[in-house]
């Protein structure tokens, strides 16, 4: 506890009984206090609206200053903890985290299966009417986006596929569109929205990126009239539910990143679920983005969590600086460690075509694997203030 930011309130029995009997304040209540005056004995008079208190405040305050506090304890002393702007931000971040649920690869597989069924029944889905061209195109684009990755394939083939999957995941849609529009406008004094939409770069983003395709389908399948006239209501409901969850995942991650933009963290983290071609394999990839473009020279960091039928969960952390690559495998047991160590030379041979200096470590650590989903969501502790009444 930081004593410099904690207010410890000394209350006599009459005051404590008054608070208890009248329930003027309760533990957990948030209050706003105004600094009224400074007494000769060093105490500070604070008006909390419901009551006034002579407080022993050990950090700088000025007359008329507002302080935001939370009731920590009511007993021999009334204790209030200070809520500063950073704490408010942490609370907001915590709420965003509680709503953050990364969509699973099973969701992607179900969505692909439902899309395949809808496309296969194009002629009969809406009582003989074919799907509109833009809807069919959006379905095909989404189906293609979630094509399973083959992590066993040659790395030269896997990297471009993985790069496209991440860049078009929907999280970066607005930023990509903004940058592309700015580049186009820099070459034209005047251009209409219609003309802008015809540029190949804009069309490419709208076609390949997941988010605009999801939005088109969400609007289409939310039309009650379409659902009522459809002979395949179950597939439509499934697709609509999957789309809602994927959009929620995209927006939750973006909101979390925005909320942390002004924090002291040097990176922003986004998590991507990877759809693998083998059902017994599951994977999530975390990408750490530097807030400042110049910071890219300080290194690029990735973290991959892979769940395999034979070897269990494996976490792999990658750190790349220029032509150097450091890889650390975290495994659950010695057997998995031995398997990786036996194949290290093959891994180095494959990667040496791309990177000059390679360092590979293998560590048995279940705790490091367990921290994958939570370690980057740590919140700064709220400061405390000692108030004495």
Image: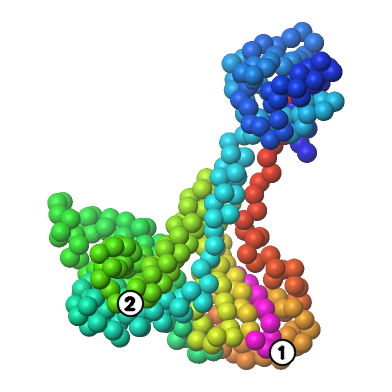
Question: In terms of image quadrants, where is residue 1?
Answer: top right
Q: Which residues are magenta?
A: 309-321
> Residue 359: x percent and y percent?
66, 78
Q: Is residue 373 visible?
A: yes
- In this rendering, the label closer to the viewer, 2 or 1: 2
Q: Nearer the viewer, residue 240 or 230?
A: 230
- Mark closest to the chain's N terminus, 2 or 1: 2
Q: Residue at x 74, y 9 (%)?
A: 39
Q: Is residue 76 left or right of residue 197?
A: right
User: Which residue is label 1 attached to?
Assistant: 339
Secondary structure predominantly adopted by residues drawn in magenta: strand
Q: Residue at x 52, y 53 (%)?
A: 256
Circles 2 and 1 in contact, beta carbons < 8 Å: no
Q: Secondary structure at mark 2?
A: loop
Q: Is residue 155 left or right of residue 264?
A: left
Q: Is residue 8 magenta?
A: no
Q: Nearer the viewer, residue 379 or 338?
A: 379
> Residue 181: x percent and y percent?
26, 58
> Looking at the picture, does residue 360 appear above or below residue 387?
below
Q: Which mark is residue 173?
A: none
User: Which residue is label 2 attached to?
Assistant: 232
Q: Is residue 58 visible?
A: no
Q: Residue at x 51, y 76 (%)?
A: 105
Q: Is residue 315 magenta?
A: yes
> Residue 307: x percent and y percent?
63, 80
> Residue 17: x percent and y percent?
80, 20
């Amino acid at each position: 506890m930081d004593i410099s930011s904690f207010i410890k309130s000394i209350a006599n029995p009459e005051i404590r009984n008054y608070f208890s009997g009248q329930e003027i304040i309760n533990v957990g209540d948030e209050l706003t206090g105004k600094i009224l005056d400074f007494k000769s004995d060093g105490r500070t008079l604070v008006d909390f609206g419901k009551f006034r208190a002579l407080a022993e405040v050990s950090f700088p305050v000025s007359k008329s200053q507002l302080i935001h506090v939370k009731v920590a304890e009511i007993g021999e002393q009334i204790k209030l903890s200070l809520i500063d702007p950073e704490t408010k931000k942490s609370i907001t971040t915590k709420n965003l985290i509680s709503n953050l649920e990364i969509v699973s690869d099973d969701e992607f597989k179900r969505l692909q299966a439902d899309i395949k069924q809808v496309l296969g029944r194009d002629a009969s889905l809406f009582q003989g009417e074919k799907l509109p061209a833009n809807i069919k195109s959006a379905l095909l684009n989404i189906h293609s986006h979630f094509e399973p990755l083959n992590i066993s394939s040659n790395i030269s083939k896997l990297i471009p596929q993985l790069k496209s999957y991440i860049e078009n995941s929907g999280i970066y849609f607005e930023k990509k569109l903004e940058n592309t529009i700015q580049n186009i406008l820099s070459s034209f004094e005047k251009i209409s929205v219609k003309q802008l939409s015809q540029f190949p770069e804009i069309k490419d983003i709208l076609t390949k990126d997941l988010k605009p395709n999801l939005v088109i389908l969400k609007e289409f399948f939310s039309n009650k009239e379409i659902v009522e006239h459809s002979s395949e209501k179950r597939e439509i409901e499934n697709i609509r539910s999957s789309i809602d969850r994927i959009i929620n995942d995209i927006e939750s991650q973006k909101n979390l990143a925005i909320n942390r933009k002004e924090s002291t963290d040097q990176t922003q983290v986004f998590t991507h679920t990877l759809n693998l071609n083998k059902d017994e394999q599951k994977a999530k990839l975390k990408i750490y983005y530097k807030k400042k473009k110049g910071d890219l020279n300080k290194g690029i960091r990735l973290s991959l969590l892979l769940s395999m039928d034979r070897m269990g969960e494996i976490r792999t952390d990658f750190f790349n600086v220029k032509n150097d690559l450091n890889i650390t495998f975290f495994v659950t047991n010695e057997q998995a460690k031995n398997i990786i160590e036996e194949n290290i030379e093959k891994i180095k041979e494959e990667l040496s075509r791309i990177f000059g200096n390679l360092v590979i470590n293998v560590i048995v650590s279940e705790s490091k694997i367990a921290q994958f989903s939570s370690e980057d969501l740590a919140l700064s502790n709220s400061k405390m203030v000692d108030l004495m009444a």
